[in-house]
Amino acid sequence: MIVADLKPLGEIVETISHFKKISIVACGGCVSICLTGGASSADALARELGHPRHYRSLPPTFETTTIQRQCEKDFVKAFLTIPPDADAILSLACGAGVQTVAEVFNTLPVVPALNTSFLGSLDAPGIWREKCQGCGNCLLAYTGGICPVSRCAKRLLNGPCGGSKNGKCEIGDDTDCAWALIIERLKVLGRLGEYEKLFPLKDWSSDRGKGPRVLGVDKTRT
Amino acid sequence: MAYFVVNDRCNGCLSCVENCPATALSYKDANGKRTILHNMARCVRCANCWRVCPQEAIEFKHFLENRWDEVIELELIYCSVCGEPVYTSRQERTLSETIGRSLEHLCPKHKASDFAARQALALKTKRINRENLHDRR
């Protein structure tokens, strides 16, 4: 799931303070589930941003709406209605959603309210943790279902570095060492012998080495 | 059958309503009763309600194992040879309007064999005509 975090309020205010009427568009997809971009977050943000203390002159007025997914152009075109008097859109989507809305409503400025953070999973209520970097060449079959690309700070593919101590990474914040987790998991699976197997150099061209990636039957269609 | 189902442990504390990120839950207090409301069109099935419910009252499995809703019932047209469903009568009407002629009620398999039979018949007729012409000469 795409996980995103609300931008600092000051940054949002700075980008919207010169507009008069702003349409806040929530997204009912991933960011709704990670409690930052859904309808309820949009209402809360509208309430907060409407407070005069954030502005030197009159605050803009806000109207909120939600669309189930902001990242599908045809869907946004068909189902997202922006009031005609709105002079800007404040999007609570991931970067893909913001860009889709900007493409559809190309005469209006579209401002992001979230920082898209990572692809992650819900580890405990309210705790999302990065689990995938979308490298385009998944190694999980060989690493006991634990990704060294996203969960090792150095993206090491052949075991832990010297900064691994008692199963934790030297970067701190109680971060698990991905390779310690992999070794434990391989032990449980009875496949520890595979740990000795050396990975060849990873081909990063599927990561972003060849530029923006496209997936589809006909990649030339837009 | 509802999607959002609570068991007898629900005490109407509104934790689910207050914590729904999609504003898919609401409530009304009227005539001495509290009613919890759920809107499936808004719901993203994130299960936050199930997570936060202090009473463990939300039977979330109904969101995952619900029944199929009947959407529409349409009259079927069957293959005149084998009886396999071919299309609906409405679909037949749309297709025949598009191609400007009525359709034969044949499944793809019998349509192919019918086409082959017609081709064979056409070839046979052509050969007979040619032979007849040859005999006359």
Image: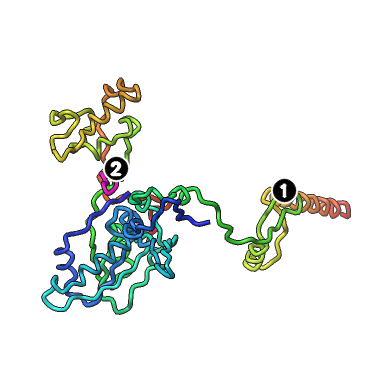
Place of residue B82 in the rendered image (x, y in percent of width and height, measured from the top left): 74, 48
**Secondary structure under the numbered disc 2 in the rendered image:** strand
**Dominant secondary-structure state across the stretch colored magenta:** strand
Crowd class of label 2 (few under 14; some 14 to 19; many from 20; radius 10 Å): few
**Where is residue A111 shown, x and y percent of the image?**
23, 66
Identify the subunit bearing mark 1.
B
Image-based side of A82 in relation to B105, left or right: left
Dot 1, crowdedness within 10 Å: few (<14), some or many (≥20)? few
In the rendered view, tell whether residue A135 sits above or below residue A167: below
Per the image, the residue denoted by label 2 is: A123
Is residue A113 placed above or below B84 in the rendered structure? below
Q: Quadrant of the C terminus of chain A?
A: bottom left
Foreground residue, B69 or A84?
B69
B34 up-or-down from B47: above or below: below
Query: Label 1, on which residue?
Result: B113
Q: Which residues are magenta?
A: A125-129
Q: How is the image coloured?
A: rainbow
Front in this rendered view, residue A218 or B20 = B20
Q: Is disc 1 placed on a helix, strand or loop?
A: helix
Whole-angstrom CA distance, mark 2 to mark 1, is: 58 Å
Q: Nearer the viewer, residue B105 or A72?
A: A72
Judge if badges 2 and 1 mark residues of a common chain.
Answer: no
Residue in the image at 36% along x and 53% along y: B49
User: Mark 2 or 1, which is nearer the eye?
Assistant: 2
**Can residue A16 be seen?**
yes
Q: Please tell me the numbered disc located at residue B87.
A: none
Residue type (three-letter) at the residue carrying disc 1? Ser
Q: Is residue A58 left or right of residue B121?
A: left
From the viewer's perspective, tell me whether residue B93 is left or right of residue A32: right
Picture coordinates of residue A69 (x, y %)? 37, 59
Of the residues shown, which amino acid type is indicated by label 2? Asp
